[in-house]
Amino acid sequence: MKEPSAVADPPAVVDVAVPLPELNRDMERGGRRRVTFEVGGESFAAHRCVLAARSSVFRAELFGAMKESTAGGKARVDGVEARTFRALLHFIFTDAVPELDGKDQETSSMAQHLLVAADRYNLERLKLICEDKLCKLIDVSSAATTLALAEQQ
């Protein structure tokens, strides 16, 4: 009789597209391909095609049935803090999230906010990064809010 293996199955590998490094430069350039988001009193410009390539939600908002909401090259975003949206755009163009490099309560809070935004814009890789960071940072002070967030997701 075989004994059960003590080694757990490896986690499933998730295939997520990663942007090219030069996309970050494109985020800062102007032009007609750009859309400007108004978020919490701040403006953020980004290229429509890059946003659409990384997010099915942005694709629908910018090129699909919802494109009327961005007519004129401007779109208002409610329910997301400006600093969170800035980090989300930075991730879309660089595949990096420097805002999550810390190990403090502010980093945990940013991970929570980014997770909600990543879910809203269907950014699977960002969701995985945020979930991983939250697992590493969970403690007594963040357990309740992390549990509430998990129930929403």
Image (cartoon, grey):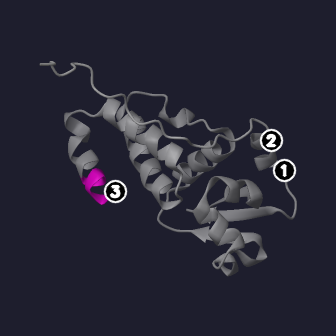
Q: Is residue 41 in view?
A: no
Label 2 sits on residue:
25
Tag 1–tag 2 contact (CB < 8 Å): yes
The three-letter code of the residue at mark 2 reads Arg
Q: Is residue 152 magenta?
A: yes
Q: Nearer the viewer, residue 75 or 1?
A: 1
Q: Nearer the viewer, residue 127 or 138?
A: 127
Label 1 sits on residue:
29
SS for callout 3? loop
Q: Name which quarter of the figure residue 68 lies in.
A: bottom right
Q: Nearer the viewer, mark 3 or mark 1?
A: 3
Q: Is residue 55 magenta?
A: no
Residue in the image at 25% along x and 53% along y = 148
The image quadrant where one finds the C terminus is bottom left
Q: Tell me where residue 41 appears, x and y as whole percent.
A: 60, 63
> Is the residue marked by circle 2 packed among few (<14), some (14-19), or many (20+) residues within 10 Å?
few
Secondary structure mainly formed by the magenta segment: helix
Question: Is 91 left, or right, of 47 in this rendering?
Answer: left
SS for callout 1? loop
* Above or below 118: residue 41: below
* Marks 3 and 1, the one that precedes in the sequence: 1
Q: Tell me where residue 7 appears, x and y as whole percent.
A: 26, 20
Q: Nearer the viewer, mark 2 or mark 3?
A: 3
The magenta-colored residue range is 148-153
Q: Which mark is residue 153?
A: 3
The three-letter code of the residue at mark 3 reads Gln
